[in-house]
């Protein structure tokens, strides 16, 4: 398999190419978990995998609890479908608590503190109450716990990993920005599918099927680094998956390394220039934490870069793709009048000179981003 085949198979499996997902929650369902620490850009990661979902559509799915946002996998913020969070949390929680162990000790979060703070937090959000971080901090302070800094962050994260808290309906700040709230885990996943409670073996198999089915071709190490599981667990998951669904994931060799993918995955991009074609390029603006990038570790290099990279000065940090290859960086800025957004300004910087077809593809991409936001989007000169 050549580089362009690897890239196209990944683009298609992740639904950055047709067939798209029917809804934002279906996009999450396909990918199992979507890194989401920058909420405005993470909304776009879901919407661009659908036929035309808007920012409001994604926000509504999060508010309704069809998509939940929580600390899981490695751990960092992720979007997870409500049906998948119960078993995925149970599978990953031991590894997450182990990874956080040093910080727990430094901030005084022992077993007793964790249990007492969990009781405080559970009571605070019981009965459908959704609270912001500051409101949770006040409840913890009243009970004698730290209400600021790292200790607060890890008390809340401990409660998320332990199945006490999960995301509630976002609220808007006075400036118009969306803010995370927290709600009862049990209440928010109460409508999860009946099959949400899986055994550990079933969970390992499910993770392997979903990861390699959407992100393949990928390596065992890619999956282990993405999931936070061990390579032994990933191999076990692959073996169990083959027992449950024989042939659903197959092994191939690329550049002398072992990869796994769903058989029948698309391996050739129609048109574009990524395989020597002469059609117009396909330009994608993806966030730097998009699963097309963060879904891999040892085989991330196939897309031609090492993102996510932190910018210098005013350099944007999000990623421009041309036919799946790294082609530049971008960011957006919202121009407001009071709380009302007037327009979105896109700072897009390409790493090589652009020709007319590339310029046209960029304009189409800018228009798609504006339609997603529901506000006019314009390109501005680099560094303006």
Image (spheres, grey):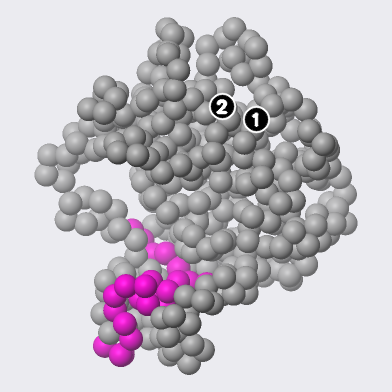
Query: Mark 2 near mark 1, Cβ–Cβ under 8 Å?
Result: yes
Q: Which residues are magenta?
A: 142-170
Residue at (71, 51) in percent of width and height: 221
Residue 211, placed above or below residue 145: above
Q: Nearer the viewer, residue 24 or 109?
A: 109
Q: Nearer the viewer, residue 321 or 264?
A: 321
Quadrant of the drawing holding the N terminus = top right
x and y, in percent, of residue 336 in the image: 17, 39
Provide the secondary structure element on which disc 1 rests: helix
| Circle 1 residue | 7
x and y, in percent, of residue 121 in the image: 39, 81
| Circle 2 residue | 325
Report the number of discs: 2
Residue 192, placed above or below residue 298: below
Residue 47 visible in this rendered orientation of the protein? no
Residue at (43, 46) in percent of width and height: 42
Quadrant of the drawing holding the C terminus = top left
Disc number for residue 263:
none
Left or right: residue 212 versus residue 343 is right
x and y, in percent, of residue 248 in the image: 81, 45
């Amino acid at each position: 398999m050549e580089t362009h085949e690897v890239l196209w198979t990944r683009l298609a499996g992740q639904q950055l190419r047709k067939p798209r997902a029917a809804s934002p929650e279906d996009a999450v369902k396909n990918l199992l978990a979507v890194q989401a620490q920058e909420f405005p850009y993470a909304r776009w990661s879901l919407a661009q995998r659908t036929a035309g979902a808007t920012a409001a559509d994604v926000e509504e799915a999060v508010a309704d609890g069809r998509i939940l946002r929580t600390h899981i996998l490695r751990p960092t913020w992720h979007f997870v479908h409500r049906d998948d969070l119960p078993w995925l949390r149970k599978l990953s929680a031991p590894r997450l608590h182990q990874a956080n162990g040093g910080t727990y000790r430094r901030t005084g979060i022992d077993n007793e503190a964790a249990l007492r703070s969990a009781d405080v937090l559970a009571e605070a959000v019981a009965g459908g109450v959704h609270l912001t971080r500051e409101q949770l901090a006040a409840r913890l302070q009243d009970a004698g716990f730290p209400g600021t800094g790292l200790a607060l962050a890890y008390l809340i994260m401990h409660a998320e990993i332990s199945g006490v808290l999960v995301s509630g309906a976002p609220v808007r700040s006075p400036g118009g920005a969306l803010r995370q709230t927290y709600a009862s885990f049990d209440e928010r996943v109460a409508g999860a599918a009946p099959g949400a409670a899986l055994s550990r073996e079933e969970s390992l198999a499910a993770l392997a099927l979903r990861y390699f089915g959407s992100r393949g071709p990928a390596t065992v190490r890619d999956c282990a680094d993405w999931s936070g599981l061990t390579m032994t667990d990933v191999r076990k998951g692959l073996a169990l998956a083959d027992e449950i669904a024989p042939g659903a994931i197959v092994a191939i060799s690329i550049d002398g390394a072992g990869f796994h993918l769903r058989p029948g995955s698309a391996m050739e991009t129609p048109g574009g220039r990524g395989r020597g074609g002469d059609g117009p390029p396909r330009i994608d603006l993806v966030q730097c934490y998009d699963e097309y990038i963060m879904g891999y570790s040892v085989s991330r290099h196939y897309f031609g870069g090492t993102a996510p990279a932190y910018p210098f000065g005013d350099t944007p940090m999000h990623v421009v793709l041309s036919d799946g290859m790294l082609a530049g960086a971008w960011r957006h800025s919202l121009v407001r009048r009071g709380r009302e957004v007037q327009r979105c300004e896109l700072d897009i910087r390409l790493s090589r000179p652009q020709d007319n077809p590339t310029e046209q593809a960029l304009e189409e991409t800018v228009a798609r981003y504006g339609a997603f936001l529901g506000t006019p989007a314009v390109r501005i000169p680099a560094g303006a």
